[in-house]
Image (cartoon, helix red, strand yellow):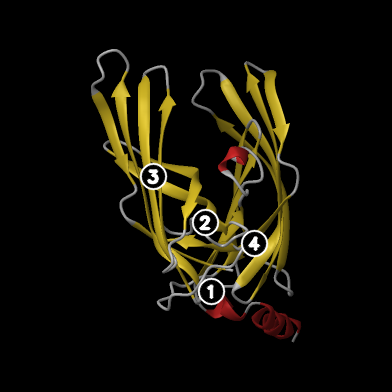
């Protein structure tokens, strides 16, 4: 009898538990100048069996802590976990240790909670950097793309997912509702010989009278072997249900010295939808 009652409580706290649902969102800063803080991206995948897979990427001043856990929420849809994640970095002899804590609650088509990351980097056993994210308050939505144009909300934060599986996006608007302040999202790039995941914070841009916007960004990452140049495009429209559109990330890696192209990567055209 207790199992039956608990199942009923879970169904009330989480109406979508009978079918697969993806939630996405996090926390985004008001400007790209704060890209190394106040950024958290969170996704929750609920396959419909009462379990949920939580993924979180939390930015601290010296690095990004990442974690993934599959768990069963409580009767009220709440969860909490803490763990230490150890990973290798691309720098020789440097390892990253991230102490992560993620808590939240799922209620209908929305979820919210907190996340923290304490990050340390060691080179040959010696700590060379350490930092903390503080507590980030995140929100996530099971968003759907809308078709009816509507004006954006001033100082609004829209949370959702992209079509690349459970990957998160957060779009923030400025106080005058005439500009996108920032767009923060996760992506997966497919290259000639590799596939990798990343996060990006794109500076904002103007919102047209019809609720559309077109954000463009270019930047380069420099490595010992060469330089990788990125192009980012985010095109969207605000609707009665939130904001939706497409995004893409492309990069070209050129070898240092002779400038020959060693690799090309792209996300392809990726659809996104986010809600308040």
Residue shown at 67%/19% (left/top)? 128
- For disc 3, the marked residue is 232
Label drawn at residue 88: none
- Residue 173 image point, x, y percent: 57, 58
The numbered mark, 1 or 3, whose residue comes first in the sequence reads 1
The numbered mark, 4 or 2, whose residue comes first in the sequence reads 4
Structural crowding at the residue carrying mark 1, measured as other residues with C-alpha within 10 Å and reported as few (<14), some (14–19) or many (≥20): few
The reply, left or right, for residue 29 in relation to residue 130 is left
Query: In which image quadrant can residue 217 be found?
Result: top left
Badges 4 and 2: C-beta atoms under 8 Å apart? no
Q: Is 177 rendered above or below residue 6?
A: above
In space, the residues marked 2 and 3 are separated at their CA atoms by: 18 Å
- For disc 2, the marked residue is 179
Is residue 169 in view? Answer: no
Badges 2 and 1: C-beta atoms under 8 Å apart? no
The numbered mark, 3 or 4, whose residue comes first in the sequence reads 4
Is residue 23 in view? Answer: yes
Compare residues 110 and 46 and report the one nearer the observer: 110
In space, the residues marked 4 and 1 are separated at their CA atoms by: 21 Å
Quadrant in which the C terminus appears: bottom right
Q: Is 23 rendered above or below residue 39?
A: below
Label drawn at residue 48: 1
């Amino acid at each position: 009898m207790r199992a039956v009652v608990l199942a009923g409580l879970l169904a009330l706290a989480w109406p979508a538990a009978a079918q697969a649902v993806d939630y996405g969102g996090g926390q985004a800063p008001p400007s790209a100048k704060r890209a190394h803080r106040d950024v958290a991206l969170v996704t929750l995948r609920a396959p419909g069996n009462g379990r949920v897979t939580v993924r979180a990427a939390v930015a601290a001043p010296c690095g990004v802590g990442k974690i993934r856990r599959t768990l069963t929420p409580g009767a009220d849809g709440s969860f909490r976990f803490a763990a230490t994640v150890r990973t290798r970095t691309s720098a020789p002899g440097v390892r990253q240790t991230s102490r992560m804590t993620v808590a939240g609650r799922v209620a209908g088509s929305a979820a919210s909670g907190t996340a923290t990351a304490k990050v340390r980097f060691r080179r040959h056993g010696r700590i060379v950097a350490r930092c903390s994210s503080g507590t980030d308050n995140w929100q996530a939505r099971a968003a759907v793309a809308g078709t009816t144009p509507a004006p954006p909300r001033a100082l609004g934060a829209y949370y959702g997912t992209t079509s690349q599986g459970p990957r998160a996006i957060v779009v923030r608007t400025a106080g005058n509702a005439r500009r996108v302040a920032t767009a923060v999202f996760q992506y997966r790039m497919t290259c000639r010989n590799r596939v990798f995941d990343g996060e990006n914070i794109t500076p904002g841009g103007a919102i047209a009278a019809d609720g559309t916007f077109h954000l463009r960004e270019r930047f380069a990452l420099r490595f010992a072997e060469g330089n990788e140049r990125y192009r980012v495009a985010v095109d969207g429209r605000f609707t009665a249900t939130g904001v939706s559109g497409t995004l893409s990330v492309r990069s070209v890696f050129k070898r240092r010295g002779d400038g020959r192209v060693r690799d090309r990567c792209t996300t392809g055209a990726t659809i996104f939808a986010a809600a308040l």
